[in-house]
Image (cartoon, rainbow, N blue to C red):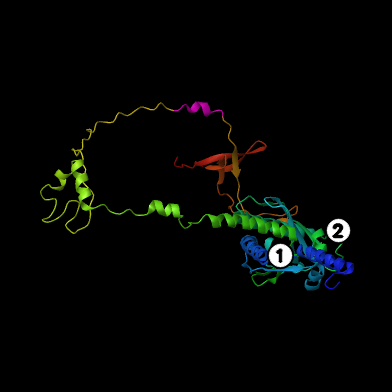
Amino acid sequence: MDGMLSQEEINALLNGLGTDESDSDETLTDEEIDAIGEISNISMGSAATTLFSLVNHKVVITTPVVEYATWDDITKNYDSPCVFIQIYYEDGLDGNNILILKEKDVKVITDLMMGGDGTNIEGDISDLHLSAISEAMNQMMGSAATSVSSMLEKRVNISPPTSTIVSMDQSVSGEDIADFLKGSFVKVSFNMVIGDLVDSVLMQLYPFDFARELYSEFVSVNSIELETPNQAPSEDYKEDVKPKSVPPQESHEEEAVQNGYMNHINGPGFMGQGASPYMNPNGSQMQPIRDVNVQQAQFAPFSQMVTQTVPPENIDLLMDVPLEVTVELGRTSKSIKEILDFAPGTIIELNRLAGEPIDVLVNGKFVAKGEVVVMEEAFGIRVTDIIKQKQ
């Protein structure tokens, strides 16, 4: 019975095969890892540009690092609490991912968005912080989705992200924890630098299914591109474009005689002495000359153009169209922080001096200047100057 397996050994072997199959569901191939890194690199580059426009500070997001992780790995290597931003895809892709930002980073970004200098980070994270970071991530990941859409050559849209404060020491079974975080998942880490204020790690977490979907979409587009470039001509094509041998000199001469071309070839001054038909004096071959009908160009004489009278437009048809007249007293600009400080009694200074003419706009178009008058119990405008603009 040597070489035979017992029933216990067979069961152990089958169990081992089952374990390998389950483990393969929580791993990616090298090609999949490279594709996820490339997609994340390009999309986060677009997101960094958008964040720069929001905070008015230089934003640098480095090349991503793709690896596997579990909830325990995240809790050990990240400060508590953190802000989780859930991102769901509506069109083009089916799945979600999570961005994790540190508490301090969220406060700095929020303060910069509100016109501060990024140093007002005292206190706990409030609903104002979560609302501001959600809007920032909405614009950032929206531009990232646009980049992904260009790569995948299909429309990709996200729903408005939701932000949640998560304590890193809470159980993985908490309500604020996504289901895919209960097992192994894909972690993409970036080093994010915002001026001299932020230098930390930004993490993006993917479920394995979503990572594989990204890879399959990426590969399908690139495989089409690989089939498009010029390919080596087939053997049949080579047969078609194979240069044909040049017929002997006599065959050209005979063909020319049959078509009546020899009178042109043998004409005086056409060939040098000793030259052969269809040959230039330098010895190169030339094509036969065909009869061409040449005549003097005839042009029609110039005549006085007849001007057609265009009937005048009947502007009376537009006289009853209502237009909106707006009087603009002045303008100013305020930051979000200053607007939130508004209260009854707040005085807002405008960019117009006292007694200076005010602007009169018709359907938003500046047409006149005027001054404020009082007519009984209502304000009125006396037009002082009409703005003439070229039509």
Q: Nearer the viewer, residue 354 or 254?
A: 254
Q: Give me the residue at 22% from left, 35% from top.
A: 299
Picture quadrant of residue 370: top right
Residue at the spot 36% in from the left edge and 27% down from the top edge: 309
Q: Is residue 264 above or below residue 9?
A: above
In which quarter of the view is residue 209 placed? bottom right
- What's the amino acid at mark 2? Glu
Mark in the foreground, 1 or 2: 1
Q: Is residue 132 visible?
A: no
Residue 179 showing in the rendered view: yes
Q: In the rendered view, does 194 fall on the left or right side of 20?
A: left
What residue type is disc 1 on? Leu
Q: Quadrant of the N terminus?
A: bottom right
Residue 46 pos. (x, y %)? 61, 60
Numbered disc 2: secondary structure: loop
Nearer-the-camera pick, 209 or 170: 209
In three-dimensional space, the C-alpha distance between marks 1 and 2, rounded to whole angstroms, equals: 28 Å
Q: Residues within 10 Å of mark 1 (few under 14, many from 20)?
A: some
Q: 28 or 378, which is in the foreground?
A: 28
Q: Which residue is mark 2?
A: 175
Q: Compared to 310, does 294 lie above or below?
A: below
The first of marks 1 and 2 along the sequence is 1
Extent of the magenta region: 313-320
Quarter containing the C terminus:
top left
Quarter where residue 114 is shown: bottom right
**What mark, if any, has residue 28 been given in the picture?**
1
Q: Out of 338 and 223, give the one closest to the viewer.
A: 223
Marks 1 & 2, CB-CB < 8 Å contact:
no
Residue 54 position in % (x across, y down): 65, 60
Mark 1 lies on a secondary structure that is: loop
